[in-house]
Image (cartoon, rainbow, N blue to C red):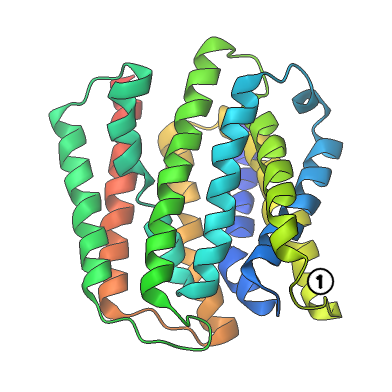
Amino acid sequence: MQSGAGKNRLLLLFAALLFSTGGAAIKMAALTGWQIASYRAGVAAAFLWFVLPAARKNWTWLTLAGGLVYAIMVVLFVLSNKLTTAANAILLQSTYPLYLLLLGPLFLKERLRIVDVTIVSGVILGAGILFSGSEKVMATAPDPVRGNLVALASGVAWALTIAVLRWMGKREPQAESAASVAIAGNAIAFTACLPLAAGGSSIEWQSAAVILWLGLFQVGLGYFCLTRSIRHVPAVDAATLLLVEPVVNPIWAWLIHGEVPSGTAIIGGVIIMVAAFAGSWWQTRAT
């Protein structure tokens, strides 16, 4: 039993490490954001369809609804990484607990408590500090202000995705709803972005290798490890392990591209992550 728990934690940690490579890898491809979003999603959808046969069954309109907001989230995340620093893209997406706590009372009939307001305030404070810094334009972050706004929008889409998954989980607790939504979402993202990707740059070997890495490993294998392990790991432990992604993501960008986040981005990001973890810990304690 102990070894099984350890294996699931390692799988979850491995998933977080794979997810963390997204920012640096996206910046390596000499392709438009629409091309990366489309091709990465297409490869990921095919991979997950193949390795998760149980997720192909019993799709409903909720699967497609969850897939749609998931698709919006992954596309916005790619576009934000093309515009701003990898650190800002992942940290601003990590503001999703703010929107999730606000969505809970509306859609999930979850009461908003004093502690929730405190957590929301922490996320707002962190995001405000991150935005307050004067972001320098650099080769890997040509439009940081617009990229930051897109990253915030991806956080809203991620919160909506989680809200849909929670609702589906309450209705059908035994179903592979999360995996089904991931497959549907990647298929939708691939199809929707394909017309915008068609007029982009030609794909050279390096860009092709990046797309394969992103689709097969960063999203595909990462999500496979996540779905196999997260239901067997306590929520607080899972939240802690998944914090590896926003911590390590900027490190990859620094090592590969020399991209250094500003001091305000670091301070704001730390506050956001602490607030996000506190929200996960409190929700687990309350259930």
Disc 1 secondary structure class:
helix
What residue is at 74 percent from the left and 58 percent from the top? Answer: 195
The percent position of residue 207, horizontal first and vertical second, equals: 77, 75
Q: Nearer the viewer, residue 200 or 11?
A: 200
Name which residue type carries label 1. Ala
Quadrant in the picture for the N terminus: top right
Label 1 Cα crowd, 10 Å radius (few <14 / some 14-19 / many 20+)? some
What residue is at 45 percent from the left and 36 percent from the top? Answer: 160
Quadrant in the picture for the C terminus: top left
Horizontal arrangement in the rendering, residue 219 relative to residue 89 (left or right) = right
Horizontal arrangement in the rendering, residue 24 relative to residue 224 (left or right) = left
Q: Nearer the viewer, residue 215 or 243?
A: 215
Q: Is residue 97 visible?
A: yes
Residue 247 versus residue 254 in the image, above or below: above
Horizontal arrangement in the rendering, residue 26 relative to residue 93 (left or right) = right
Q: Nearer the viewer, residue 97 or 141?
A: 141
What residue is at 17 percent from the left and 33 percent from the top? Answer: 115
What residue is at 70 percent from the left and 75 percent from the top? Answer: 31
- Please tell me in which quadrant of the rendered image residue 202 appears: bottom right
Q: Is residue 1 visible?
A: no
Residue 237 versus residue 136 in the image, above or below: above
Q: Which residue, as the protein is rendered here, is positioned at the far left? A: 114
The percent position of residue 152, horizontal first and vertical second, equals: 38, 56
The percent position of residue 32, horizontal first and vertical second, equals: 66, 72
Look at mark 1 in the image and give the residue it sits on: 209
The percent position of residue 284, horizontal first and vertical second, equals: 35, 27
For the image, the number of numbered tags is 1
